[in-house]
Amino acid sequence: MELTWKFLVMLVFGSVVIQYIIIQSLTSTSFLMCPAPFNSRPEVRLGSMDEDPNTTRRMHVLILTATRCGSSFLGQLLNQHHNVFYLFEPLHHVQDSLTGENFLRQLTLGANRDLLWSLFQCDLYALERYMRPPPTNHMVANLFNYRISQALCQPPVCEGVKLGEEWSCNGCGQVNLTLAAQACRGKSHVVYKTVRVVVVGDVRSLLEDPRLNIKVIQLVRDPRGIINSRIEAFPGWYKPWYSWKTSGQRPPSLHVTPPFTTTCEELHSSVSTALSRPEWLKGRYMLVRYEDLARNPLQKTKEIYNFVGLTMTPSVERWVSANTKGANKEQNNNVYSTTRDSVANVENWRLKLPFEMVQHVQAECQDMLSIMGYRQVHSAQELKNMNISLVQETTFEPFL
């Protein structure tokens, strides 16, 4: 039995390695080998980097976070600027195409870094290696949540419809990656947000690459709020947690759900690294708590814009105001909606989670709670007392 189990593990490992090697062999060499980003595909080359007027001044912004930390809203804050090219979760396609990633975290991580490097160079054809079925003539029908991106809903990518100050992708159809790359190269800022990479140390090689100009925004959230949001957004994935929340009784099958402790460990590891102020992060890292962004959205947006070198515009200010004053029922039911009553939403998990569940999360995530300035509660009465905030007043200045 033991030999059979080992054989199956080796078989899965080998199949994924072969899959990734084949994918890589059909496309460009890994960026770690320092290739010119388009040289491996001359038939679709979009022009040399020297011909790109934005090459020397383009800012690459990477939003690192975990699922249900508020990153959709943060991404949209930057997406609203007219000089930003934004993609929502481009690494989703890596996860979809590489199987067995629990055995091969490092392999998946390498694929994620490779893809990010290419995308920051506006080489959007790199997405094709992870798409099933493969695109024809660089026309893509399944680019994940592409309608969120303002740059993909307007010329030259699409003759979209402008509704007020925002573009709509209604009627756009498939995405032409050639035109999308052209749009990317025409912007001063390229922004990608991902929940597939949480630890900033995992992208150190990108930050140290002289060909890139990366700034990282690390978004964190109270883990007690994270688990409540995940239960509400993905009840099928968190069935035992959902049962515990609704019944008040801890189920014996809690261990079969996605390991929540991993989220806390990764966020704690990343923040700890950043707070140690390594030289490779100098001038490139900003830590943002979801709660601070929700309570003071306009002020925090200005700080974020200043960090990445964008100028606040009246249209962005109007968008922030309109999207933090509340939502209708339809918007609240949308997992990826960015419209919320931001102040009311900050600690409302306290009114929804049973005290025993909160105790469990606190025990599993006490290091992360401590380093990020989140107070623990020690009774059900303290949990429900909304007159006392559990978010300590803490300032995290960008590491400049």
Image: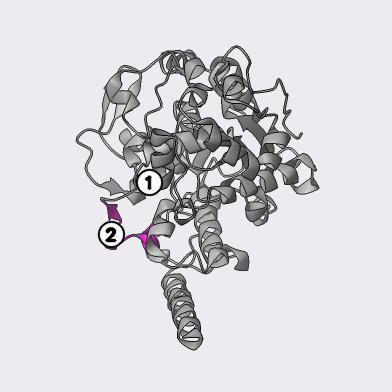
Residue 160 magenta: no
- Residue at 34% across, 41% down: 146
Depth check: give the residue in front, 235 or 212.
Answer: 235
Q: Earlier in the sequence, mark 1 or mark 2?
A: 2
Give the residue type that dot 1 points to.
Lys
249 over 45 or under it: above or below? above
258 over 311 or under it: above or below? below
- x and y percent of residue 365 in the render? 64, 42
Depth check: give the residue in front, 321 or 356.
Answer: 356
Q: Is residue 156 left or right of residue 14?
A: left
- Label 1 or label 2, whichever lies nearer to me, is 1
- x and y percent of residue 81 in the render? 47, 26
Measured Cα–Cα span from mark 1 to mark 2: 36 Å
Depth check: give the residue in front, 29 or 264.
Answer: 264
Q: Is residue 380 left or right of residue 247?
A: right
- x and y percent of residue 49 in the render? 54, 52
Residue 138 magenta: yes
Residue matched to label 2: 135
The quarter in which the C terminus is drawn is top right
Give the residue type that dot 2 points to.
Pro
Q: Residues within 10 Å of mark 1 (few under 14, many from 20)?
A: some
Residue matched to label 1: 239
Q: How many marks?
A: 2
- Residue at 42% across, 74% down: 19
- x and y percent of residue 226 in the render? 51, 36
Secondary structure under tag 1 reads helix
Label 2 near label 1: C-beta < 8 Å?
no
What residue span does the magenta drawing correspond to? 125-140
67 over 22 or under it: above or below? above
Q: Residues within 10 Å of mark 2 (few under 14, many from 20)?
A: some
Question: Is there any visible trace of residue 239 in the rendered image?
Answer: yes
Q: Going by the picture, which residue comes out furthest to the front?
A: 249
